[in-house]
Amino acid sequence: MPQPLAAKMTNAGSSARMFASTVVTLGCAFIVLMAAGVAVVTALTREANRLEAQRQAERIEAAVNGQIRLSELRLEGLMSTNDLADALQQPQQMPALQATLKRLRSQLLDFDGVHIVSMSGSVVASIENMVPTAQGQSEGQRHLNAFLSGAKSPTVSVVIGDEALPQTGPTRTMVLNDSGETLLLTAIDLSRIMPIDVSSMRDQLSLIAYRHISASMLSELAERYRVADIRLVSSFPTDPSSVLALRAPDGTIGAWLTWSPARPGDAMLHRFLWALILVALLFSGIFVFVVQRLRAAAEQIELRERQIQRLAGQDELSLLPNRRSFDLTLDQSLADLAQSGAALAVVLIDLDRFKAVNDTYGHTAGDELIRQVASRLSGALQPGDTVARLGGDEFGIIRTHLPTQAGCAALGEHILACLTEPFIVMDVEVTIGCSIGIAMAPRDATNRETLLKLADTALYEAKNGGRNRYSFFEPQMNRSLQLKRMVEDDLRRAIENDELTLHYQPQVSVDGSTIVGVEALVRWPHPEHGMIPPSDFIAIAEERGLIVPLSEWVLRRACTEAKRWEGVRLAVNVSPIQFRHKDFVANVIRIIQETDFDPTRLELELTEGVLIEDADAAEAAMMDIRAHGVGLALDDFGTGYSSLIYLRRFAFDKIKIDRSFLEYMEATGESAILVHSMAHLGRALGLRVCAEGVETAEQHRFLQAIGCHELQGFLFSRGVPAEQIDRLLSVDNPFSEVLSAA
Ligand code: C2E
Ligand code: MG
Ligand code: MG
């Protein structure tokens, strides 16, 4: 059994799942890659912006500090002049010093003010370079005064507002802010830069110079370092990357220099945005391309998987072994069986109404139903059993483990119970059924082909028997089934090619002396199967819609042949389906006219089946046909739904007591009573009474005694070809020999 191999196979659809998972993985990778790309670009942009802002801040800070350093250098340069040194040798000559400072004024134009102050706080000399305010004192002067007023030897204190800041060391460089104005202050202990003996001096002197941080200075910075919107603010700005704290000597922040930093990263991004979009599109294109290639590859793989599964013996839908696998297993099991002498059973299962589910709910539902059936069947098995899907809605089971008739019957029952339970398919409850055929080896056959054929025959029988049942193969099924299939295939052609023929069975007067009528009985002389009786093909003709052409052929042929038997009635059988046809009466009349047959000689034999379905329509048709002079007989009386009501209501001319009553008449007295009653009843209703199936002289005598009018049976004659009727009619009392012999 190649099941293990099949089991190893990847399920059909696994490549589809692999493809889906690969696409998902690739998709995730693609998204991650794109997100990473965006993150890197954003980070690079930010970093470029940050670095440039930092560089600008450093440069601006250096520039501001440079200004202070420059001031110091300049002051040092100034104060080292001999003029100043000389002047300071004699402090009493301060006016001269002032004059010197004034003279140096042109060289001190960079400063807004320069003062020489003593540690006691008095201004020794100064260059007033500030515009007085409305209060009479310029801001610069005010700050300077504050600075000076707090000075104490040897420490200089700088006062901003109410706060006194102790200053140490000879050189002071500071930035002060008050009332929105920022000064760059440079204080130098003169003793540091002048070759004078400080001890000879009454007081230590400091030189203080200051500058406003002016608008022109800011614009110069902006221009040099390419920054926009540079300004001084007294509170901390919102963007910390573009700010420089200006501190007083004690570390407190006096003001912030702020500006809008250049954003080279942003600029770069804007410049190369199209390129980035292009790259993203390129990647997307590559992604789509790769996915398509993958899908094509997955489809190829799936196709190959299916081929492999088929070769490996697995049905791709139900995942059960397939027919090939089933055949191999059966071959193998039969080979084992030949050696071991054991038995096996083959069970074929055909679903009923599967097609209806497929047609109603679609193929997806049909597929789902097949899977569920496969699962239920698998659950119904015993260890050692093999179940396979043989195709469409057909399944097969091989039972090798001690199959007995009773065990297989139980399996059949179990499968019926499993499969007739409702299924839920795509949220809909569906009910199907199944037919089961069982054949056993070696009892029925020992090779696979035959065994399967026999199981199939049994299956066919189960279906014919009304479905939802199981049948074991029985030898007689074979012939009848073969015949049935042959009839199905050949009947139409046989009617069209005039291959059928008619026999006529005499209906004789009760004394047996005269042929009063003949019943036309159709026959099919088949080249292979011999003479086929009507019981073998009338029902199939009804099923296949061939009964109307068949009946018309019979009536036409019978009228044509019987025309020559003057004074003899012609009985023709009518099938219920034919009788219900809307053109039935018209057709009969047409044929009578076409064959120029005397309608009063024609008698149609109806069975009770014609009456029960639509009694009103039947009654109308019968009235119509009788109006044309055609007689009506109720055939097979007593076997169907006979009731007095029928006999009363419908206008029959004759009843034909079914031959089954005569068959049992000798065995049971009951039948004789029944026949007697029926004859009596017919007579009482004014009908002619005919008894069918008269085979013996005793029956004849009995029927005569109870008052039947006509007799029909093998005692007188079987159904015979027309030529024989010619001969029978050509002699007087044709059955005298038979009767006297009896
Ligand atoms: P049926 O109409 O009751 O025909 C009588 C059947 O009983 C005939 O069988 C006849 O051969 C058989 N029979 C007559 N006497 C005896 C007898 O003494 N012993 C036994 N054992 N049988 C006897 P056949 O010809 O096989 O016909 C069977 C049935 O087929 C007919 O039963 C009739 O219902 C149907 N049939 C025959 N020909 C036609 C036809 O042309 N059209 C239709 N619709 N049905 C037909
Ligand atoms: Mg008949
Ligand atoms: Mg009959």
Image (tube, rainbow, N blue to C red):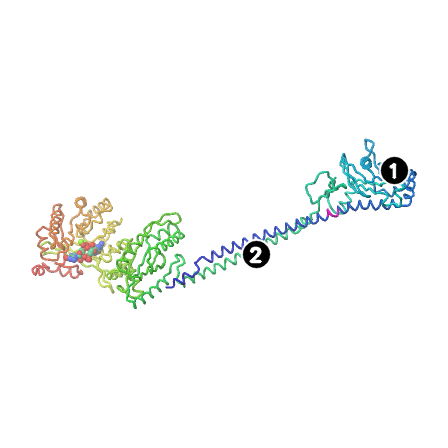
Q: Is mark 2 within 8 Å of ligand 1?
A: no
Q: Nearer the viewer, residue 720 or 99?
A: 99
Residue highlighted by disc 1: 124
Residue 44: image x %, image y %?
Answer: 65, 51
Residue 475 image position (x, y, % from top left):
24, 62
State the mark number for residue 17: none
How much space separates mark 2 and mark 1, taking CA atoms?
83 Å
Residue 645 percent across, percent down from the top left: 18, 44
Tell which of 215 and 431 is nearer to you.
215
Image region (quadrant) for ligand 1: bottom left
Q: What's the residue type where badge 1 is placed? A: Val
Instruction: Tell which circle, 2 or 1, labels the residue nearer the N-terminal end.
Output: 1
Dominant secondary structure (helix, strand or loop) of the stretch shown in magenta? helix
Q: Nearer the viewer, residue 344 or 708?
A: 344
Query: In which quadrant is the C terminus drawn?
Result: bottom left
Residue projecting furthest to the front: 199
Look at mark 2 in the image and give the residue it sits on: 286
Judged left or right of residue 145, residue 645 is: left
Q: Is residue 595 left or right of residue 261?
A: left
Q: State which mark lies toward you, 2 or 1.
A: 1
Q: Is residue 341 above or below residue 32?
A: below
Circle 1 Cα neighbour tier, 10 Å, few/some/many (<14 / 14–19 / ≥20): some
Label 1: state its secondary structure. Answer: strand
Direction left: furthest residue: 740
**Relative to 488, does residue 143 appear above or below in the rendering?**
above
Q: Is residue 541 magenta?
A: no
Give yes or no for contact between labels 2 and 1 (Cβ–Cβ under 8 Å): no
Q: Looking at the image, which is closer to me, 194 or 660?
A: 194
Disc 2 marks a residue whose amino acid type is Ile
| Span colored in magenta | 56-60
- Asked if residue 613 can be seen in this view, the reply is yes
Residue 86 as seen in the image, left or right of residue 458: right
